[in-house]
Amino acid sequence: MEEESMEEEEGGSSSSYEAMMDDQNHNNWEAGVDGYRQPHVPGHARPPRGDRDPPLPADRKGPREPLPEEEVPMVPDANGLQKGCDSAGAAGKGGAGPVAAATININTSTSKFLMNVITIEDYKSTYWPKLDSAIDQLLTQSPGDYIPISYEQIYSCVYKCVCQQHSEQMYSDLIKKITNHLARVSKELQASPPDLYIERFNIALGQYMGALQSIVPLFIYMNKFYIETKLNRDLKDDLIKLFTEHVAEKHIYSLMPLLLEAQSTPFQITPSTMANIVKGLYTLRPEWVQMAPALFSKFIPNILPPAVESELQEYAAQDQKLQRELMQNGFARGDQSRKRAGEELTYNGSSACANSRGYR
């Protein structure tokens, strides 16, 4: 009996101790939660206990941590600005930061766009003069010359003018510019003497074709978005056609007899000059082959019909005629033996040197 009474006393004391600790923990939790609540303002009634923060779980001890604020999703607008979905509400509460910033940025971008507009007056006074000067230098340059122009700047000017809907005006100005240049070239060729006519025509043709290799890439945006799209043509073909109409067609009937005469006289003009002119004329207008098929066939393959066996004797006669003409102009055939020309002299000289060394 004494043992049972002692156990009951020990159990009662332990339960009372646990109850006291629970009360202490509960008071500590109340104090911790009140620390995170807003301070009580006199004159305002506290909300009932049921409306306060929910209690912590049973296994949670200590003060309750504040809940993280909900993140407002950011939505990018058309100008690349990120605005919160509740920006209107924030503006209504006096927080007009995001909306005001968006308005300022929109106005700034609009003003920048308006400042970048290229009017027709700007094109004529600023952009086309730069293009005009660059085209002048490209058309008059000699092969291998250094051109002190900025290709990046010219390319940028063309790009901006195309974006601002000035392609039609720019194409018209380019064609007019090159047409005037070719008219001057044609007049200079007409005033050339016959002995310089072929050489000067070759220079004019090579200079123009070399200039096209720079002009066409510089105007590639105009070619892609205006000439090919709206006119269904190509800029390079249009510019080659200009040379054909304003230079080649006016001089072909004066040039061809001089070419045939130069062909009959070997090396009256250099072979490279003859080849450049014949190939250039074929590029400009292939129909001109009919004016001198034999001349064009020497530099362009498949001009004449294929050879036939019945005409072999005629081909051999033509080769013999060419050889006789070369011999008459001082070109010797050389030694026709199996030894190369000068080989015997070299051999004898080396033998003599060897014998002289042997006698020493």
Image: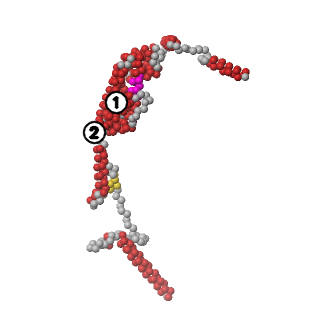
Label 2 to label 1: alpha-carbon separation: 27 Å
- Percent x, y of residue 201: 39, 21
Front-lying residue, 279 or 198? 198
- Percent x, y of residue 168: 30, 33
Residue 212 appears in the figure: no
How crowded pointer 2 is (Cα within 10 Å; few <14, some 14-19, many 20+) is rated as few
- Percent x, y of residue 284: 38, 23
Which residue shows up at 41% across the image and 32% down it?
147
Q: Secondary structure at mark 1?
A: loop
Quadrant holding the C terminus: top right
Front-lying residue, 61 or 191? 191
Looking at the image, tell me whether mark 2 or mark 1 is earlier in sequence order: 2
Q: Is residue 155 above or below residue 78?
A: above
| Quadrant of residue 236 within the rendered picture | top left
Mark sitting on residue 119: 2
Which residue shows up at 29% across the image and 44% down it?
115
For label 1, the residue is 233
Front-lying residue, 353 or 29? 353
- Dominant SS type (magenta): helix
Q: How is the image coloured?
A: secondary structure
Q: Is residue 62 magenta?
A: no
Mark sitting on residue 193: none
Q: Callout 2, which amino acid? A: Thr
How crowded pointer 1 is (Cα within 10 Å; few <14, some 14-19, many 20+) is rated as some
Q: Is residue 204 magenta?
A: yes
Which residue shows up at 36% across the image and 36% down it?
154
Q: Secondary structure at mark 2?
A: loop
Magenta highlight range: 202-211
Q: Callout 1, which amino acid? A: Arg
